[in-house]
Structures are given as C-alpha cells and as structure tokens.
Image (cartoon, helix red, strand yellow):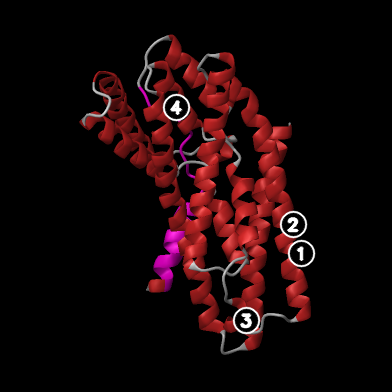
Amino acid sequence: MKRLFLIIVLLSFLCPSTAVAQNPFLDQGKDNTETERTETEISPPTFLQKVPRFVVIWQKELRARMSTFALEIRERPFGSSFWLFLLLAFLYGVIHAAGPGHGKTVVASYFMNRPGSVRDGVVMANLIAFFHVASATVIIVTVYLVLKKSGMSSFEEASPTLHKISYLLLLLLGLYLFSRTLYELVKGKYKNDRDSQGTAVRGGILVTALAAGIIPCPGAAIILTFTMIIGIIGTGLLSMVFIALGMGLTVSVTAVSTVLLRRTVFRSTQRNPKVFTVVYGVLSFTGSILLISLSGLLLLYYLR
C-alpha cells in the first residue's frame, strides 16, 4: 500500500496536466489585454497546456483576493492586508507550481537516476523555485531601474532565450546521466541496495537546480510588475520570497516522492543481485531518457 501510494503521488505530479501562468490580478481593459498576450507568447507548447480544473479555480480566487489586498496596502502599508497578501503569495506559489514546468519533471528524473536523501530532494526543489522566481525578479527590477518603467515587454524578450539555454543545459545533463548509468552497469558498480544509497553530490544539485530554474517565472513577474505599478514595490519583492517558498513546497512533494519510491523499489529487490541490477538500470535509464526527451522536445519547440 505504501509503495502504491508513492507511485500514485509521483505520477500525479509528473503528468503534464498543468496551468499556464496567469495574471494574478483582475485588471480590466488595456492592461489585461496586454497581460493575456504576454501569457500566450511565453506559454509552453500546446501538449503541456492541459489545465486541471482545481488549479484554474484556485488561481482565479487568489487573483481576486490579492488584487484587493494589494490596493489596501497602499493605504495601510503594514496592516492586516500586508500579511494576508504575503500569505496568499505563498499559496499562489503552491498552486502555481502545479502548473507547467517549475522543475517537477527535472527533480523526478534526477532522483530516479541518482541516489539522494529526502533532504537532498527538498534542497533541490527549493533551489529550483528560488532560481525560477529570482530570474523573473532580476529581469523586471533591472528594467525598472534602468529604463524607469514597469511592464512585461522586456520579460517577453528575455524569456525565450533563457528557455533555450535552460533546455540545452538539461539536455546535456540528461545525456550525462544516461552515459554515467551505462558506465556503472558495464562496470557492475551497483549490485545491491547499499551500493546505490547515499547523498547526492552538492555540485550536481546546484547545477541541476540552476539549469532548471533560470527560466523566469511568468506568474512571479506579473505579480511584481503589478506591485510596481501601484507603488508597493517593497511588498512585491518580499512576496517573491513567499512565492518561491510555496513553489518549493509543491516541487518538494515530487522530489521526496521520487527519493522514497527509488529507495523502496531498490530495497525490495536487493536480495537478488541480478534482479536488482535490472531494476536499477530500468529506473536509472528511465530518469535520464525522460529528461533527454522532454528537454529535447522543448528545445526544438523554442528553436523553431
């Protein structure tokens, strides 16, 4: 039952039924039209845009409430609306990360292929979320400070390039993991569960998180842009931290589920070295091939 639960949780987060980043505020007219255009231009390929209904409903509700609290913060900067806005920013991150990308497939692929602890999974998940939000923040703030304006045009221009860089790095990572798995199997390095356990290499976690996280988060960018427009930039910057924490929580579920699933499967086959080697190869190759396939398809999509 425990093993079945882990498999169900993992598959539910790996499925590409995800929400496209949406405007977290319910502006009307020209601003809203511009935002919708932005979302369309930087959205993922069509095959990744199936939207689970609960994500749409919750994001819509959060957008409405955040809009109200954001406007109230201008009148009372540190009143109850300030704290409620940050709380909703955290919840927005949790729900938003159930959408396309955000590193769920990356962490699952990595920990299917490489050994790691629960802590390693949580660290990588939160690093990806931090880099994801930080990338958007740097773009928006830089444009604001240099050009003295707020908007999404520069974000739209930078986003495709960062997508290409990210997917190229992830493709190379997938090829590395595949070749390393092949080498380990040929050399007979892993014959039992004890050989396959251990903590992940810190450098590997950091590089993987950076490669996956340099893609700027549209949802975070739109929230930050809105707070700049209405004059609460400090609150907007602080909300980026809470969004990253919320996203990190969601991605951590996938990472931890993968780590525990890998550990459970290996322990159940460790008594038979031949069976263990086969299972190790299948699981490890699946992780690397999944990463190669997805990053390769997305790279081709953005290069077209």
Judge left or right: residue 175 versus residue 220.
Answer: right
Q: Amino acid at mark 4?
A: Leu
Q: Nearer the viewer, mark 3 or mark 2?
A: 3
Q: Which residue is the site of mark 2?
A: 175
Query: Residue type at mark 3?
Result: Asp
Q: Which secondary structure, mark 3? A: helix
Q: Secondary structure at mark 4?
A: helix
Say few, some or many: other residues with alpha carbon within 10 Å of mark 2 (under 14 / 14 to 19 / 20 or more): some
Q: Nearer the viewer, mark 3 or mark 1?
A: 3
Residue named by callout 4: 224
Q: Is mark 1 in CB contact (under 8 Å) with mark 2? A: yes
Q: Residue at x 58, y 65 (%)?
A: 112
Please tell me whether mark 1 or mark 4 is closer to you in this view: 4
Q: CA distance from mark 1 to mark 4?
A: 41 Å
Q: Which residues are magenta?
A: 3-25
**In front: label 4 or label 2:** 4
Measured in 3D between alpha carbons, the distance from the residue under mark 3 to the one under mark 4, in whole angstroms, is 47 Å
